[in-house]
Image (spheres, helix red, strand yellow):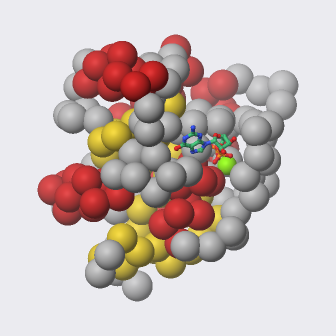
Amino acid sequence: MGLTLAIVGRPNVGKSTLFNRLIGKRQALVDDQPGVTRDRRYGEGRIGPFRFRVTDTAGFEEAKGDTLEARMREQTERAVEEADLVLFLIDAREGVTSMDQHFLRWLRKQHRPIVLVANKSESKASFAGLGEAHRLGLGEPIPVSAEHGQGLDLLLDAIRDKL
Ligand code: GDP
Ligand code: MG
């Protein structure tokens, strides 16, 4: 299998929901509680005719009593290492949080192409967050709703632009 994408971001932004959407199955466990994804999960993803390997990550919510920096590395370093391209998710309704920024500082050092995905964009509550996301300097954020299956065609275009 050629291309590998990793889905990364802080807890609760909808990584597992997007993963499930891309693989078309209820494979990863999704919950309101952060920390539900216990391992990295692999799946065969698909957007229309475009096929790829995709990795869901736990974010960095798992290891307790450690520094944020260390947890980030522990949970996602290998997934990012293995990836040809990283989908960096934020919650568009919440905008860019300090945890997003902290995560992104680390992610930028990993030297992988990054597509900025603004999830939970199904409502007007996401507009301000999209503006904030734009200012991260990762290009146009891609508004999607993993839950409602919206924006996947835009996401595919953005992925192709980065490859
Ligand atoms: P993860 O911790 O990043 O893996 O996030 P999850 O996929 O577990 O999702 C966290 C919460 O956000 C769950 O309650 C999801 O149902 C919800 N969620 C995920 N995607 C969307 C979306 O596009 N819109 C809205 N409104 N909620 C979403
Ligand atoms: Mg998850």
Rendering coords of residue 11 (x, y %): 65, 35
Residue at 51%, 20% in the rendered image: 94
Q: Write down the quadrant of residue 92 in the picture.
A: top left
Q: Vertically, is 37 above or below 59?
A: below
Q: Quadrant of the C terminus?
A: bottom left
Rendering coords of residue 143 (x, y %): 34, 40
Q: Quadrant of the N terminus?
A: bottom left
Tell me if I can see residue 72 in this picture. no
Rendering coords of residue 25 (x, y %): 62, 73
Q: Vertically, is 34 above or below 1?
A: above
Q: Quadrant of ligand 1?
A: top right
Left or right: where 2 falls relative to 30 = left
The residue positioned farthest toward the bottom in the image shown = 1
The residue positioned farthest toward the front in the image shown = 124
Residue at 55%, 73% in the rendered image: 24
Residue at 77%, 27% in the rendered image: 66
Rendering coords of residue 160 (x, y %): 20, 62
